[in-house]
Amino acid sequence: MIYDFGVVGAGIVGLATAAEILRARPGASIIIFEKEDGIARHQTGHNSGVVHSGVYYTPGSLKARLCREGAEATKAFCAEHGVAIETCGKYLVATNAMEIARMDALHERAKQNGVEAERIDGAELARREPYVAGLAALFLPSTAIVDYPGICAALARMIAAAGGELRLGAEIAAITEEAETVAVSSAAETLRVKSLVVCAGLQSDRLARLAGVAINHQIVPFRGEFYALPSARTALVSRLIYPIPDPTLPFVGVHLTRTIGGGVIVGPNAMLGFAREGYEKFSFNLRDVAAYAAFPGFWRAIVAHLGAGASELRSALSKSYYLAQCRKYYPSLTLEDLAEPFAGIRAQAVLRDGTLAHDFLFAETPRMLHVCNAPSPAATSAIPIARMIAEKALARFAAA
Ligand SMILES: Cc1cc2nc3c(=O)[nH]c(=O)nc-3n(C[C@H](O)[C@H](O)[C@H](O)COP(=O)(O)OP(=O)(O)OC[C@H]3O[C@@H](n4cnc5c(N)ncnc54)[C@H](O)[C@@H]3O)c2cc1C
């Protein structure tokens, strides 16, 4: 049998894409290949669980538009499919003069991006969040927390109900584009599809290369460490508490996040990872490290972000330094509160000139579309991203 469509990767982007293709073309045959024995096992299942409102991104950019549309679409999807979500809002807290200037710039950006935002002073912040300290804050009421693996489970049910197939434990090791089909091989079998979409997150550059697609970037893993705060702490913040981010970096800074399960987590930092999928503290994978060490853009990025990198390294190696970052805006936090660590790993595309790609990157051939960079907030934006990818895949399919 030749399938109409194939998707590699059952994270939120791959699953939303498959669901969107089936919505646009009911009756199409589609198969999803996932190397793990469950869905959402990597970035999608190890993130902060936040539905971002879209304040950070350059006005008019694809990222800003997709985030705003994605937040609305995610809320509607959760309401329709009974997935847990809570629109609790978040504070971006400024703790010094430089951060106030950056916060005011973000306030302007919020207006340009059509995101509701309220600027409050330190006294009002103290009244609303007595355990949080800051000189001023920006309140974003539309930010939400959600169960992303729950969204993926709902998508998988929709796909199955529409006749789609999900192959778990199917690690794709070869992809060959042929005249009329693409041959996709795991250790167990080779199947053919007419159009292939690859949403492989941390492995996306490897899959592009093994499919013979010319790319100009390298995935570098950035490890983000979180701590689950003890239950005595969970009542002490009612919203999400974020620092003011450094505008030169693609990460939003260590934050306090309420989780859909009723807990509070703090994190993630963002330090260079030594394994793409190694979640334990000192995970090291020689193949992963050798791959980025051999890429010239990696060293250019290291030089460009030396200061931030050193600070993140300190926060990874020293709990006291990590604590100091959080105590800037949450002074009562103690070392004992940082007891239960866990990690997520971001797939960060680094370009040959050393730029950390902030936006989505795609690579296309006549029968394939590879999602090469789907950085945060790609979980928030997954539904409109999937629509965009599905449109491209369907257009390619119609032309074939
Ligand atoms: C620490 C952290 C915090 C974040 N916080 C947020 C947040 O709060 N809000 C937000 O919107 N975004 C957040 N993000 C970003 C968001 O999680 C990701 O952008 C999003 O999950 C990317 O989804 P994906 O489907 O592209 O990748 P993934 O979820 O990584 O899925 C890729 C899938 O491809 C599979 N795969 C790889 N290689 C193969 C192969 N050879 N064969 C078969 N299958 C393969 C993998 O097993 C995996 O299941 C965060 C990310 C991290 C890491």
Image (tube, rainbow, N blue to C red):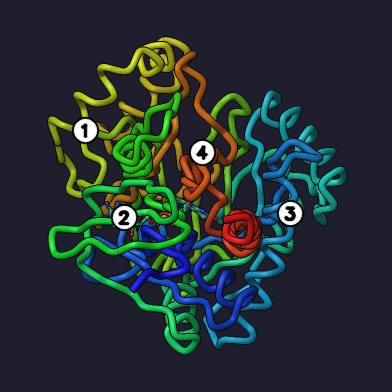
Q: Which of marks 2 and 1 precedes in the sequence? A: 2
Q: Which residue is mark 2?
A: 183
Helix or strand or loop: what does disc 1 sit on? helix
Q: Nearer the viewer, mark 1 or mark 2?
A: 2
Q: Nearer the viewer, mark 2 or mark 4?
A: 2
Evaluate if marks 2 and 3 touch, with contact meaning CB atoms under 8 Å apart. Answer: no
Q: Please state which of residues 101 and 344 is positioned toward the viewer in this rendering.
A: 344
Q: Which residue is mark 1?
A: 288
Q: Which residue is mark 4?
A: 363
Amino acid type of the residue that numbered disc 4 sits on in the rendered structure = Ala
> Which residue is found at the position 63% from the left and 61% from the top?
398
Evaluate if marks 2 and 4 touch, with contact meaning CB atoms under 8 Å apart. Answer: no
Q: Which residue is mark 3?
A: 139
Q: Which of marks 1 and 3 precedes in the sequence? A: 3
Residue 372: x percent and y percent?
Answer: 46, 40
Q: Nearer the viewer, mark 4 or mark 1?
A: 4
Classify mark 2: residues with Cα within 10 Å, few (<14), some (14-19) or many (20+): many
Helix or strand or loop: what does disc 3 sit on? strand
